[in-house]
Amino acid sequence: MKINNIGPSGINPYKNQAKQTMKASTHAKADQIEISNKALELQERSKFAEVRQEKVAALKIAVENGTYQVDPKTVAKNMIDFYKK
């Protein structure tokens, strides 16, 4: 069985592939970063987390010292309002 190469496809295809990769590598783009609106919102929330941690630490100290006082009427009113809505 005889195989005849017709046209330029019979020439070394690996050489053509190497040329294409060389062309692609010379036009490389610079790296970019884009931050979505959701990511920016999450960054803003992290600032509030620091303030929240300070409040929790203060409440923890008050509970440990026994100086934390709860108004039972306010708690009951808020619970009733929550379940009525």
Image: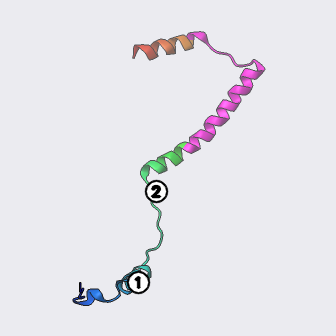
Colour mapping used in the image: rainbow
Question: Cα distance, mark 1 to mark 2?
Answer: 36 Å
- Which is in the foreground here, disc 1 or disc 2? 1
Point out residue 15 in the picture as x, y percentages from the top left corner. 38, 87
To which residue does mark 1 refer? 18
Secondary structure of the residue carrying tag 2 is: loop
Task: Characterize the magenta stretch by its predominant secondary structure.
Answer: helix
Q: Residues within 10 Å of mark 2 (few under 14, many from 20)?
A: few
Q: Is residue 63 magenta?
A: yes
Name the amino acid type tagged 2: Ile
Point out residue 79 in the picture as x, y percentages from the top left corner. 50, 14
The quarter of the displayed image where residue 72 is located: top right
Point out residue 9 in the picture as x, y percentages from the top left corner. 27, 86
Which corner quadrant holds the C terminus? Answer: top left
Q: Is residue 55 left or right of residue 25?
A: right
Name the amino acid type tagged 1: Ala
Please name whichever residue, 8 or 62, is drawn nearer the observer in this view of the structure: 8
State the count of labels: 2
Please say if 10 is above or below 70. Answer: below
Please say if 40 is above or below 50. Answer: below
Q: Residue at x 35, y 87 (%)?
A: 12
To which residue does mark 2 refer? 35
The quarter of the displayed image where residue 73 is located: top right
Q: Where does the magenta region start and end?
A: 46-73
Point out residue 24 in the picture as x, y percentages from the top left corner. 40, 79
Secondary structure of the residue carrying tag 1 is: helix
